[in-house]
Image (spheres, rainbow, N blue to C red):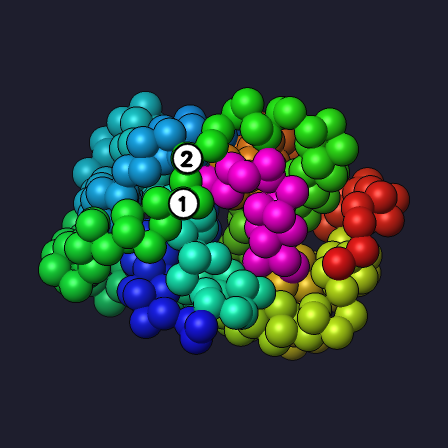
Amino acid sequence: MPISPILYLVSTAHFFNDIYMGFLTPLFPIAMEKFGLSLSMIGALSMVAAIASALSQPVFGTLFDRFGVTASVYLAPLLTGILISSLSFARSYSFFVVLLFLGCLGSAAFHPKGASVTPALSGRHPEIGMAVFSAGGNLGFAAGPAVIAVFISIWGFPATPVLAVPAAAVALALFLLLPSREIERRTRTQTRVTWRSLLSDRRELSVLSRLVFINFSLQVAVRGLQTFLPVYMTGLSVSITEIGVIFTVMLALGAVMSIFVSSFSRHTGKRFLIFLSVTASVPLCLAGFLLMPSFWGYALCVLGGITLTFSNPLLILFAQKHSGGSPAMASSLIMGISWGLAGLLMVPLGALGELVGVKGTLAAVSAFPLVSAVSCFRVPRE
């Protein structure tokens, strides 16, 4: 069975859902200046985003596995787009945090359902299907920094609510082109099991726990770079537009590379490529920020970001295979718990930056993936 065209519609929803999450990277230095924030408070913004967009995913995964809810495919991008685009309305740090939390909560509602329906729509090519779904979100997330940075440079921060219009358009298009009954018909056999089956097999649970830990270590580096590197670059007199473009290139190339890596994994196995993502990213990221603001500094940071992110669809698919029949729950653990726990570390990392400087924090997050190197060899070969 070939890949269903419906998968590309779901990937489109993923693109528009995550483009608004990509807005946050250039907004951190803007919020820092607007509200007079410390590095710890910037870390707190990243933590709030992680709690809402990631740690809440297992709750949504439970609901979707049990009840087969499909409306999140339409409503999540709409809610995310409206609230994140409205961050310029915030006149205080507290109001900014509330809008950020609610907007990221909308994003969280999309991911478990979207990831769980993808294998059913992928035919004989689950690795490619998951890579296409993941690439949709990654490309949206990649486009976000450049879109918001260029928009603000031309029309200013107060005009950003206009950017909610694409979210409304895609929500309407998907509602018309992708009926809920079709998603339910295609996936009803895959979304009926929850925590009981997930916890019933200790061996599978052990594998899943290691995969979550590996992804957690990678996400500490990814989120740390997204949170603190823009602040560091601003201190080097790099413009918001340049920051947005650099992160867009990094994340877009990572999304494209993930498709090739996922296809290549059928020949090498997933475990080797995951280990490569964990280890090869460290020297690239370390050398990159140390050489900034030179061309080679930018280039190495981009390569490091690509290496950190290309294994994401492999980890999701790996987790679903060892989920005990709970694909939405497994997806929410990989994309939720690991991302959320990584976000929680941003506050102590921000506090570390106030003691040793932002460069010290960047060194810590760049090297963090190495803590999971051994775990890569304790997951099965596939």
Residue 134 seen in this snapshot: no
Dominant secondary structure (helix, strand or loop) of the stretch shown in magenta: helix
**The residue stretch that appears in magenta:** 311-328
Q: Position of residue 6 (x, y in %)?
A: 31, 65
Q: Nearer the viewer, residue 40 or 372?
A: 372
Total marks placed: 2
Where residue 276 sits: x, y (%)?
Answer: 79, 62
Residue that numbered label 2 is attached to = 192
Magenta residue check for 339 = no
Q: Where residue 23 sits in the image (x, y, percent)?
A: 37, 53
Inspect the image, locate mark 2, and give the three-letter code of the amino acid beneath it. Answer: Arg
Left or right position of 223 against 95: right
The answer to whether the residues at label 2 and label 1 have Cβ atoms under 8 Å apart is: yes
In the rendered structure, which amino acid carries the disc numbered 1?
A: Thr
Question: Which quadrant is the C terminus positioned in?
Answer: bottom right
Q: Nearer the viewer, residue 274 or 168?
A: 274
* Location of mark 1 (residue): 189
In terms of secondary structure, where does tag 2 sit?
loop
Name the residue at 24% across, 34% down: 90
Q: Is residue 196 left or right of residue 26?
A: right
**For residue 261, what is the image quadrant?**
bottom right
Position above or below: 327 against 287? above
User: For residue 301, what is the image quadrant?
Assistant: bottom right
Q: Secondary structure at mark 1?
A: loop
Q: Is residue 313 magenta?
A: yes
Pick whichever, 144 or 230, lies toward us.
Answer: 144
